[in-house]
């Protein structure tokens, strides 16, 4: 027996190539041998007569203005980024400057290649709902040209019963804008320790910084460093390290009148320049009240790093690095509340085993306690979580993924002790959801994968990516799932424990 069947819903989300943002485009930078052609292009635009420039700008706005929010401002911004290459900037008319910005812009379809790996949390807005309904926010990994991932959203309403409706996702997309953030000294110290950067300069800076500080305070502290420290052979290199580590934390915000599905969390630091992958959202609650938290994988083209984000309203997001041996791989998922006073997370630090890690007093995630290693035939390559644990009366329900022959991904489940999550008290024999014939073909074939479900009205709602080609939804009664898990052998009798 493999437990109760997960009921697939007919509704699916598919990649929409009309969902586009405007990015900076610098001719020549996409070539194998970079040779910018920016200066020559600006000269050619500058030599257009006023009438031709006005006509070109008007045609461009007419053609693209309806697809983007405040395109005029975007063109102004892109002109500002390249105006250092303008020989006589003051001689250019406002129209020509706008047109230069248009020539240095291009559309990018954020999910033209794939849409996958969703997670689901209760939406901040629960107004205007009927009996048995819950509005949810669905985070999505959206992949465009060059396999570049960003984080997008959809809004859905669950219930009554097993009914689901997804709100229209049309309208101009908006990339979050960087805003001021209050940095945390403990995270700066944890990052420096992880990079083994401990000397008189770092010690002096950490001692001078308050627990929370802004960019101006940070730069003032660096500027006040004694010359005899900066003149040391490691002084300038340490300053670079301090700035690089500090820059890993930032905040991004969206206009209040944007809908959730219009917001795009786009890579904003070098560490995530090649993608923000597999966000696992959870509604976290402690003595301070509820807040949305998530983890995601930052990818720079060679290296991966785990990042955390926090938001009170899914409009303003604070992004911070996660430090320590427990988060040195993909697949970190936070518990939705402290357990016994401890902040816990699921992880896969060794690349193949589900583990449990705890945040220490220095804001570093400790070496994990193993929970579940590859053992059954459908998961022999590796196992990992499918999102944050879900609290039930019977224990913490953990959705898992396992990888089997032909790199086939399937979804299973574990149950952890409610008070001592280090203990696995039950597991589902076999898989809960496996790729069927409709799921197996896509951008990455033979995969079903989720970054987090939730329970509503006794049903486990499981959003899942199907072969990275589309997003589906499945449901299963929680009571039936846990009853099936109870039939498995006790932990002491399981092989490989």
Image (cartoon, rainbow, N blue to C red):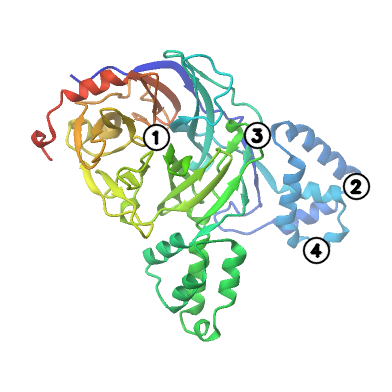
For numbered disc 1, what is the local secondary structure?
A: loop
- Name which residue lies at 75% across and 52% down: 79
Say which label, 1 or 2, has the lower sequence index.
Answer: 2
| Residue where numbered disc 4 is placed | 87
Say which label, 1 or 4, has the lower sequence index.
Answer: 4
- Name which residue lies at 30% across and 24% down: 434
- Name which residue lies at 50% across and 57% down: 248
**Which label sits in the foreground, 3 or 4?**
3
Q: In the current view of this chain or complex, which residue is farthest to the front?
A: 287
| Residue where numbered disc 1 is placed | 451
| Residue where numbered disc 2 is placed | 50
Callout 4: few (<14), some (14-19), or many (20+) C-alpha neighbours within 10 Å? few
| Residue 267 percent across, percent down from the top left | 54, 48
Callout 1: few (<14), some (14-19), or many (20+) C-alpha neighbours within 10 Å? many
| Residue where numbered disc 3 is placed | 258
Cβ atoms under marks 1 and 3 closer than 8 Å: no
């Amino acid at each position: 027996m493999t437990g109760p069947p997960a009921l697939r819903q007919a509704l699916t989300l598919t990649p929409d190539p009309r969902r586009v943002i405007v990015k900076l485009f610098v001719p020549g930078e996409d070539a194998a041998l970079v040779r910018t052609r920016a200066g020559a292009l600006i000269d050619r635009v500058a030599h257009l007569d006023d009438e031709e420039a006005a006509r070109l700008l008007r045609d461009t706005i007419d053609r693209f203005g309806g697809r983007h929010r405040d395109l005029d401002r975007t063109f102004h911004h892109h002109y500002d980024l390249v105006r250092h290459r303008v020989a006589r900037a003051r001689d250019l008319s406002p129209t020509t400057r706008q047109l230069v910005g248009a020539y240095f812009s291009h559309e990018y379809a954020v999910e033209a290649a794939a849409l996958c790996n969703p997670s689901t949390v209760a939406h901040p807005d629960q107004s205007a709902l009927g009996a048995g309904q819950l509005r949810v926010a669905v985070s999505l990994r959206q992949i465009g040209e060059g396999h570049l991932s960003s984080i997008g959203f959809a809004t859905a309403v669950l219930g009554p019963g097993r009914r689901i409706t997804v709100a229209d996702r049309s309208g101009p997309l908006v990339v979050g804008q960087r805003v001021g953030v209050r940095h945390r000294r403990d995270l700066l110290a944890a990052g420096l320790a992880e990079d083994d950067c401990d000397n008189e300069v770092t010690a002096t800076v950490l001692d001078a910084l308050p627990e929370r500080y802004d960019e101006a305070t940070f730069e003032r502290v660096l500027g006040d460093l004694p010359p005899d420290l900066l003149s040391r052979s490691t002084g300038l290199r340490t300053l670079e390290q301090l700035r690089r580590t500090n820059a890993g934390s930032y905040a991004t915000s969206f206009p209040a009148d944007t809908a959730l599905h219009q917001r795009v969390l786009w890579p904003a630091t070098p560490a995530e320049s090649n993608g923000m992958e597999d966000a696992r959202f959870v509604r976290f609650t402690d003595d301070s009240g509820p807040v949305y938290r998530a983890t995601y994988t930052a990818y720079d083209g060679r290296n991966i790093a785990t990042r955390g984000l926090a938001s009170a309203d899914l409009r303003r997001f604070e992004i911070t690095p996660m430090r320590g041996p427990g988060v040195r791989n993909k697949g970190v998922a936070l518990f939705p509340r402290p357990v016994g006073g401890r902040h816990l997370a699921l992880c896969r630090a060794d690349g193949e085993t589900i583990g449990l890690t705890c945040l220490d007093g220095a804001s570093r995630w400790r070496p994990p306690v193993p929970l579940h290693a590859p053992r059954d035939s459908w998961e022999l390559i590796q196992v990992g979580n499918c999102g944050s644990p879900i609290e039930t009366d019977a224990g913490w329900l953990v959705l898992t993924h396992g990888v089997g022959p032909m790199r086939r991904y399937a979804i299973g489940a574990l149950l952890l002790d409610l008070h001592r999550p280090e203990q696995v008290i039950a597991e589902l024999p076999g898989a809960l959801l496996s790729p069927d014939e409709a799921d197996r073909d896509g951008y990455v074939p033979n995969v079903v994968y989720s970054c987090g479900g939730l329970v509503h009205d006794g049903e486990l709602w499981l959003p899942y990516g199907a072969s990275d080609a589309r997003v589906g939804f499945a449901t299963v009664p929680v009571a039936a799932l846990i009853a099936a898990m109870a039939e498995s052998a006790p932990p002491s009798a399981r092989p490989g424990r």
